[in-house]
Image (cartoon, coloured by chain):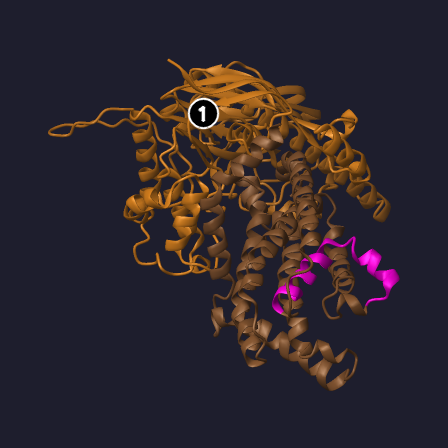
Chain colours: A brown, B orange
Amino acid sequence: MATFRNLTALFRYRGLIQTLVVRDLKARYRGSVLGFFWSFFNPLLLLLIYSFVFTQVLVGAHDKEMEPYALFMFCGILPWTWFSSSVLESSNTLIAGGNLIKKVLFPAEVLPIVTVLANMVHFFFGLPVLVGFLIYYQRPVDPVELLWFPVIVLVQLVFTIGLALLLSALTVHFRDLKDLLGNLVQLWFFATPIIYPMLQAPVAMRRWLNFNPMTHIMISYQEVLFFPGPHGHWKWLMATAVVSVVVFLAGYFVFDRLRDSFAEEV
Amino acid sequence: MTSAIDVINVSKVYRRYARKRQFATLKSAILDGSLLGDLNPDETFQALKGVSFSVPKGCTYGVIGRNGSGKSTLLKCVAGITRPTQGEVKVDGRISALIELGAGFHPEISGRENIFINGIMLGLTKKDILRRFDEIVEFAEMQDFIDAPVKTYSSGMYMRLGFAVAVHVDPEVLLVDEVLAVGDQGFTHKCLDKFAEFRRRNKSILLVTHSLDLVEKFCDTAHWLDHGVTKGEGDPKRVVAAYIIDVEDSEENALAKAESTRLAAVAKEITEARETALTENTEVSASSVPSGEGSASSEESGPKDGFKSEEGRWGTREVEITNVTISGPGGDAGHVFQSGEAIQVRMDVTSKEKITDFVFGLGLFNADNVCVYGTNTNLEEFQPTEIDGAGVVTFTIDKLDLVEGTYRLDLAAHKADGYPYDYHRLLYTFRVKSRIRDVGIYRPDHKWTFGGGIKISSR
């Protein structure tokens, strides 16, 4: 019950969270020449690299209906970048913010949440690039289908925050996680249909891929933004939403239980 | 009067660094919600042991104690940064903790933005901060630099800004951990004025400090912690006095220990030197064996050279100083004395045969090896007749008019021409304590008088 009370207190910190997200964004590009433009350039460069590899180097590694392949991948890579950098950064966020936790009365859960939200804003900054390419390739998006987009983002947000809370709390005790995570996230990337469509995965593999919540989040993005026709994956998405809430609660529970140790262990 | 802070039987146990046990505790931490559930006592460190007190509203409460006595842990428990292992802390009203100033500052962004972020972290709203912004900047004396990134600030500027934000949060309860050393004298006065203003507005301050002056001047109650246990609580003057006595006692022990090791080292050196001298040159007669550091040099530079700073002992020991005690007005031997008190230096001497040419001398040096005073029985025109067997020499200073500091003594017995019998160079250390923070070495007996239009009173 105490956990639940703390959870409701989270709502009171929205002003603090908002301020810190803005600070994070401001501080990130402070001192660089292009500043905020990096939020656009990074995904753009990423897209160019993948386009080059899959249209010039690995020609014919995919079906004709997957053209333009670069766009297909971009629909997944953009939200995946949000997910992966959130997970990687949040594992270190309590240790990096040790000064706040040790010296100021500060709600520690704000730190991983801010990390996830700041990366979400970066994701949003990348969306105009995606829109630009949709227009360039003349791929109209069904506006009704587009209504699913915020839902997918919300599911991913809840899932990512849950994971970020769990990992940030555990990393305080197991610093090894920081190094391990880089590889795990890489593995997770390939275990998620992002640079390949789900349909190209072997049938035996597909069953396993279905256990991966990120699979359904990514397929949903692809369905909405890339594939024509209605969003046929929504049942899976809803199931993933439930999983996300469970992950969030579990993550928060562990975080809350370990909360007292942060000031001493960080 | 209701209390602003109630600390009820608070204990805090920290885990010692024991990696191998981490898994067990993490499991118990998540499942039972207890972080120390299954730890052995030798894996823990108890920082606070059943501390209780309460701070009434509008009261300034000072916590004193030596390093490692649990003061900061106590403050963190009150602030809610760590939770006590046992016991309970109740705080009525908004807390602002000045534990580390500017803890939330981000180096890359400007002071202006950091004020907002820091303020929000401390519980203000944007509107509150906007209203107090100018006041904060002015208080921090930062008008010219407020738009520069915080990483370009000097540490003093950084701290001042942090302090300014923290005190303008307008807390009901202010927790202060040794942060008054953040600026020049002027800024310190401003901080103290701010504290005084807090008191007038019936807010409570919990102050952790090593500045006993501050506790005596500002606090209504003082609390003395020692190794996590309350050693005293109550009237600041009384508690501070008890604390000072305790500190002096332990300083005394430390000096006594240092002195005995030094004497032991010197004694060892002497015996070794003697042995080598004897084996190297068997013809040297016992009477002319100068022991200690090198033969010729020490004899030449012996007692007359008051500026030779190396400690040690040399001489022929025809007359030997066997024991030295320094004692205070009560007659108890000690190493810490109050300025203005009487002290006595007593030398036990003995001679193996009858000697008629002898002088006893004493030199007093401060920590910088400046000779404060030096004299001997020859200079003061005593005429030696004879010494045979054991004797006692006592040197009494009726009023030790020295400023606070550490002082060392030379004691010697030698011939009128400087030929050393037994020379003890800087071997005896004592500390002089004073309530007055005057400077220099010597404090002449003095008084101030004022006349005319001057109105002045002692604090």
Tell whether position B127 is magenta.
no
Tell me: A101 left or right of A76: left
User: Where is the N terminus of chain A found, in terms of image quarters?
Assistant: top right
Q: How many marks?
A: 1
- At horizontal 65% and vertical 58% (from top left) the residue drawn is A83
Q: Position of residue B370 (x, y in %)?
A: 49, 43
- At horizontal 49% and vertical 48% (from top left) the residue drawn is A17
Q: Position of residue B122 (x, y in %)?
A: 44, 40
Q: Residue furthest right?
A: A204
Secondary structure, mark 1, is strand
The relative height of residue B359 versus residue B141 in the rendered view (above or below) is above
Q: Chain of mark 1?
A: B
Q: Residue furthest bottom?
A: A56
Return the residue nearer the eye: B294 or A63. A63
Specify the amino acid type for callout 1. Answer: Gly
Tell whether position A216 is magenta.
yes
Q: Position of residue A232 (x, y in %)?
A: 68, 60
Tell me: B401 left or right of A242: left
The relative height of residue B114 versus residue B430 in the rendered view (above or below) is below
The relative height of residue B316 versus residue A96 in the rendered view (above or below) is above
Q: Position of residue B51 (x, y in %)?
A: 57, 19
Q: Residue furthest front?
A: A229
Return the residue nearer the eye: B251 or B2. B2
Residue B304 visible, this angle: no
Q: Quadrant of residue A76?
A: bottom right
Magenta segment, which residues? Answer: A201-225
The residue that mark 1 highlights is B62
- At horizontal 63% and vertical 29% (from top left) the residue drawn is B254
Return the residue nearer the eye: A57 or B277. A57
